Image: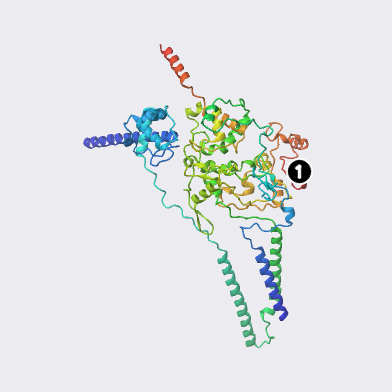
């Protein structure tokens, strides 16, 4: 018994020993990972060239093991004095690595160990294949037609059978009226035509001039889903003038180039159009470069030789406007975005989920008015000082709130449904 | 009988015409009531200019056209706007920018939260909400400055302003933000970045002084 205990003890001790060491290792590696991500990952990838060289296998390339400490502490000085550093600079210029004199030797060791042990994460098995959306309306249509035919045949069978039974029992009836002269059928048909015709006429008349679901083809396949959804770019990054101006503003090409100077290719999830063709994101970015007059190979704009103030070959992108109010309606974006603090999605729908933007609301007057009736303004609370100070002049409402006659102020109550507010 | 056939024929054609005229092609905007009330006769934003009357080409003096390019007249400053930043976009200008002081020395709480909002819209996408270069796009753009590093704590406001105004295209991947943030907003955002960085690190001289004093205490 005691022998067993001894063995168990030994096994336990060695297990503990192994566990301790492996745990210790993982702590080291994690440390290296954190340090790498905080300090190096912006310019280096372990296994791929990026802004700077791939770091994996560094020890086989550098002249001696101590080189790395000197280099990390002060790259500029090393370039001036050391031959290998100089060749490195020649290869990657004009970029010079930032010095990290704050990193200690053991921290650099941890980073370099993490880099050498790095294995790329396995691809998530089975990239989600997009389920093609099935449209059932055709199926339902056919089904309805079949059922209608069956019902018609049954009616005919019914009348024939009645005729037979009538003959058997000797009841005499007149020659049956064919269905197309049957008054009931005719009446039903006319009523159906009348209501259908009326429905479509009225529907068409109301819809005239409204462009709900309008989804024009744009000069560049720009996916709001990729930009605002996947990459979480704020709407106001590109459409910043919606805070200060009547118009939401289409970003000028330089705003696109802020990111696309660096992002040359699309590597995200496959984009498939509704008709099933695949969108080549990288080719669309190339189109942008053409509009901007940008040379991706030299990483610079084309020279302006013809003196028109823009790089040669650059031209504006003629985006097709989707949301459009008639001229007899005044609408101001800044009033809604900045003062009213409305989300873009309230009127434009879930833009961040639209590959191609379409008009989400009908922008009809009824829709405007409805929102003005329901939306509360950021009314000034005189006790706490919270809210928009503009509303301090509404004495009556302040008194009403004080006397508990009303609890909140809507856009309508400050005149948001007056005709002249928007039509003048 | 004949009348009935005629009637139904007319009804069916009417239906088909009506329905086909209302069928919507989502790629087309459709028609409007009274186009002269719907489409503006004055120039709206992004409206196409009549190239027969207007030109944006400064050199086009021959055709007697009206020059129009939607840019403010040269040498004018918008009311309330700060004076222009005059250092040129080259390495010399970059060096000189360090001596340009931040004209804003005090910001109220509301101004600071506005600066934070602007930072989160325009900068945080790469530099991260806390300035640690971990924004959603940081991995895709690459070479993002971690603003909490000592290097950037020591960087002067003027140099930051220079980088935001012209971009750091030749070295890094940052473009110009002059079209997205006006001058005042740029200086305010720099003030906000300072709050993200935490206490400024002592540069080497003061560090040495601290060491000395520590030594004295030891003695």
How many marks on residues?
1
**Place of residue B25 in the rendered image (x, y in percent of width and height, measured from the top left):** 62, 60
Q: Name the residue under label 1.
A: A415
A139 vs B173: above or below? below
**Place of residue A27 in the rendered image (x, y in percent of width and height, measured from the top left):** 37, 34
A166 vs A44: above or below? below
Nearest to the observer: residue A351 or residue B102: B102
Nearest to the observer: residue A308 or residue A296: A308
Looking at the image, residue B60 sits to the left or right of residue B91; the answer is right
- In what element is the residue under mark 1? loop
Crowding near the residue tagged with mark 1, few <14, some 14–19, many ≥20 C-alpha atoms within 10 Å: few
Looking at the image, residue A242 sits to the left or right of residue A276; the answer is right
**Place of residue B146 in the rendered image (x, y in percent of width and height, measured from the top left):** 48, 33
The chain holding disc 1 is A
Q: Residue at x 61, y 25 (%)?
A: B105
Looking at the image, residue A413 sits to the left or right of residue A343; the answer is right
Please identify the residue farthest to the left as the structure is shown. A3
Indicate the quadrant containing the N terminus of chain A: top left, top right, bottom left or bottom right.
top left
Nearest to the observer: residue A57 or residue A92: A92
Q: Residue at x 63, y 47 (%)?
A: A346
Whether residue A333 is visible: yes
**Place of residue A342 in the rendered image (x, y in percent of width and height, measured from the top left):** 65, 43
Q: Residue at x 23, y 35 (%)?
A: A6
The answer to which image quadrant residue A51 occupies is: top left
For the rendered model, the colour scheme is rainbow
Whether residue A103 is visible: no
């Amino acid at each position: 018994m005691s022998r067993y205990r001894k063995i168990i003890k030994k096994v336990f001790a060695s297990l503990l020993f192994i566990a301790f060491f492996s745990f210790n290792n993982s702590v080291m590696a994690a440390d290296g990972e954190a340090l790498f991500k905080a300090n190096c990952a912006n310019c280096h990838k372990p296994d791929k060239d990026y802004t700077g060289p791939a770091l994996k296998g560094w020890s086989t390339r550098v002249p001696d093991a101590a080189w790395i400490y000197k280099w990390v502490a002060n790259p500029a000085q090393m370039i001036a004095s050391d031959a290998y550093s100089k060749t490195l600079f020649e290869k990657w210029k004009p970029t010079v690595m930032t010095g990290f004199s704050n990193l200690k030797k053991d921290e650099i060791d941890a980073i370099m160990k993490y880099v050498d042990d790095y294995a790329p994460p396995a691809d998530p098995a089975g990239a989600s294949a997009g389920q093609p959306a099935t449209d059932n309306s055709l199926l339902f249509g056919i089904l309805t037609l079949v059922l209608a035919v069956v019902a018609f045949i049954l009616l005919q069978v019914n009348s024939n059978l009645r005729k037979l039974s009538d003959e058997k029992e000797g009841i005499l009836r007149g020659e049956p009226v064919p269905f197309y002269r049957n008054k009931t059928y005719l009446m039903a048909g006319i009523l159906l035509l009348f209501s259908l015709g009326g429905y479509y006429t009225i529907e068409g008349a109301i819809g005239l001039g409204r462009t709900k679901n309008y989804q024009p083809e744009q000069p560049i396949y720009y996916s709001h889903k990729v930009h605002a959804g996947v990459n979480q770019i704020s709407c106001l990054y590109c459409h910043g003038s919606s805070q200060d101006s009547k118009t939401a503003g289409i970003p000028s090409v330089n705003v696109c180039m802020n990111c696309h100077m660096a992002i040359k290719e699309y590597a995200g999830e496959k984009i498939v159009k509704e008709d099933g063709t695949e969108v080549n994101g990288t080719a669309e970015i190339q189109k942008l470069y053409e509009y901007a007059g940008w040379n991706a190979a030299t990483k610079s704009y084309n020279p302006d030789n013809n003196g028109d103030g823009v790089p040669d070959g650059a031209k504006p992108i003629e985006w097709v406007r989707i949301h459009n109010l008639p001229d007899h309606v005044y609408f101001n974006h800044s009033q809604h975005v900045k003062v009213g603090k409305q989300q873009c999605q309230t009127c434009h729908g879930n833009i961040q989920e639209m590959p191609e933007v379409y008009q989400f609301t009908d922008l009809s007057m009824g829709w405007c008015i409805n929102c003005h009736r329901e939306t509360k303004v950021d009314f000034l609370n005189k006790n706490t000082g919270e809210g928009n100070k503009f509303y301090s002049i509404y004495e009556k409402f302040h008194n009403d709130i004080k006397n508990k006659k009303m609890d909140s102020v809507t856009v309508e109550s400050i005149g948001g449904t007056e005709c002249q507010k928007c039509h003048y | 009988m004949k009348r009935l056939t005629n009637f139904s024929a007319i009804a069916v054609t009417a239906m088909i015409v009506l329905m086909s005229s209302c069928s919507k092609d989502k790629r087309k905007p459709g028609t409007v009531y009274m186009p002269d009330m719907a489409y503006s006769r004055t120039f709206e934003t992004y409206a196409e200019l009549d190239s027969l009357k207007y030109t944006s080409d400064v050199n086009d003096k021959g055709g007697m056209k009206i020059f129009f390019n939607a840019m403010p007249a040269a040498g004018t400053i918008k009311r309330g706007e700060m004076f222009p930043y005059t250092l040129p976009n080259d390495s010399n200008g970059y060096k000189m920018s360090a001596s340009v002081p931040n004209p804003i020395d005090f910001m109220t709480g509301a101004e600071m939260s506005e600066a934070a909002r602007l930072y989160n819209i325009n900068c945080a996408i790469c530099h991260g909400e806390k300035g640690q270069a971990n924004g959603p796009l940081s991995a895709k753009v690459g070479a993002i400055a971690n603003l909490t590093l000592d290097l950037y704590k020591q960087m002067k406001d003027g140099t930051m302003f220079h980088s935001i105004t012209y971009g750091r295209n030749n070295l890094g991947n940052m473009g110009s933000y002059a079209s997205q943030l006006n001058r005042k907003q740029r200086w305010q955002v720099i003030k906000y970045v300072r709050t993200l960085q935490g206490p400024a690190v002592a540069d080497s001289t003061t560090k040495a002084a601290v060491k000395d004093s520590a030594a004295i205490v030891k003695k």
